[in-house]
Amino acid sequence: MGKVISLINQKGGVGKTTTSINLSASLALLNKKILLIDLDPQCNATTGIGLNKGSIEKSVYNVLNKTATIEEAIIKTKYKNLYVLPANINLAGIDIELEQENNSSVLKSQRLKEHIDKIRDDYDFIIIDCPPALGIITTNALTSSDSVIIPVQCEYFALEGITQLLKAIMYTQANLNPNLTIEGVLLTMLDARTNLGLEVVEEIRSYFKDKVYNTIIPRLIRLTEAPSHGKPIVAYDPKSRGSEAYLNLAKEVIKNNGTN
């Protein structure tokens, strides 16, 4: 059975989508069959992997409003072992549509899980890129997931909002998904030349203890360039430090889940 992992942090600009794309691509490169789900209305994971969001006929929006099956909406990318459930602009309205449905909040929160459960055996890992908000879309992701990865930027105020995020995780555990765990905390955008960055690393490790990955994602121009070319870093610049970092992260994820 495939493991479902959400990338979550309601704070924007922490490398969540960058990690969703590059962790997925790196796991695929390491011979794992991967489904990347773009659950962010900004659609950056969709375009960052090389798809044209304007030409997508069936997306995660159609899956959530039950006008398409998840099998119909999944697209195989040009990269071996990597599949995407894409997003388009329509996803921006799904919160309102779900709220207007005459269903309980629990049923609304389980909409994505119903679909994922049908196909999770087909993949080794399912990675969900969540929006930078703690609304019903994110609740659907948390209800569907086995665990979460929390990207934390190595900058001042790094822990800002983390308490609120942890409360959302605990609420989901108590009411919707008792098996949800924290897969790991990922330090991102480290500028090792600054004392502040290194101080934040120590602060995060002190706060989250052994949940923090050994791999730290550096702040690199090549990582920010890659999505504009519709490529993960392992395809855009395979020999870069960014590619090496995400491959190391993928190896940690595989090791922590007891697979070869």
Image: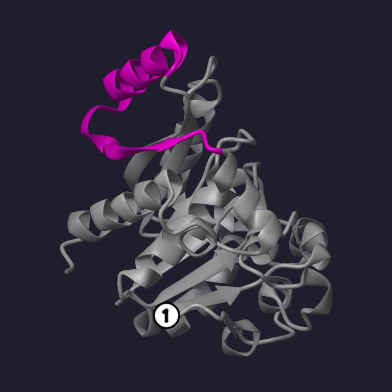
Vertical arrangement, residue 169 with respect to residue 107, above or below: above
Check the picture and name the quadrant holding the N terminus: bottom left
Q: Mark 1 = which residue?
A: 81
Instruction: Please name the residue shown 31% across and 40% down the image.
Output: 215
Instruction: Report helix, strand or loop for mark 1.
Output: loop
Residue at image position (38%, 12%) is: 199
Q: Is residue 163 visible?
A: yes
Tell me if residue 203 comes above or below residue 66 in the rendering: above
Q: In the rendered view, does 136 fall on the left or right side of 223?
A: right
Query: Considering depth in this image, is 13 or 171 the residue closer to the camera?
Result: 13
Q: Position of residue 68 (x, y in %)?
A: 69, 86
Mark 1 neighbour density, 10 Å: few (under 14) some (14–19) many (20 or more): many
The quadrant where residue 238 appears = bottom left
State the colouring used for the structure image: one colour
Whether residue 142 is visible, yes or no, is: no
Residue 193's x, y, as percent? 44, 17
Q: Is residue 247 magenta?
A: no
The reply, left or right, for residue 144 in relation to residue 56 is left
Q: Quadrant of residue 76?
A: bottom right
| Residue 202 lies within the magenta run | yes
Q: Amino acid at mark 1?
A: Asn
**As drawn, 249 above or below 161:** below
- Extreme residue in the front direction: 239
Quick one: quadrant of the C terminus?
Answer: bottom left
- The picture places residue 91, in percent across and down from the top left corner, at 76, 63
Magenta stretch, residue numbers: 193-220
Q: Residue at x 60, y 37 (%)?
A: 10
Is the magenta region chiefly helix, strand or loop? helix
Given the current orientation, which residue lies at the most extreme bottom position? 72
User: In the rendered view, would you say 29 is above or below 164?
Assistant: below
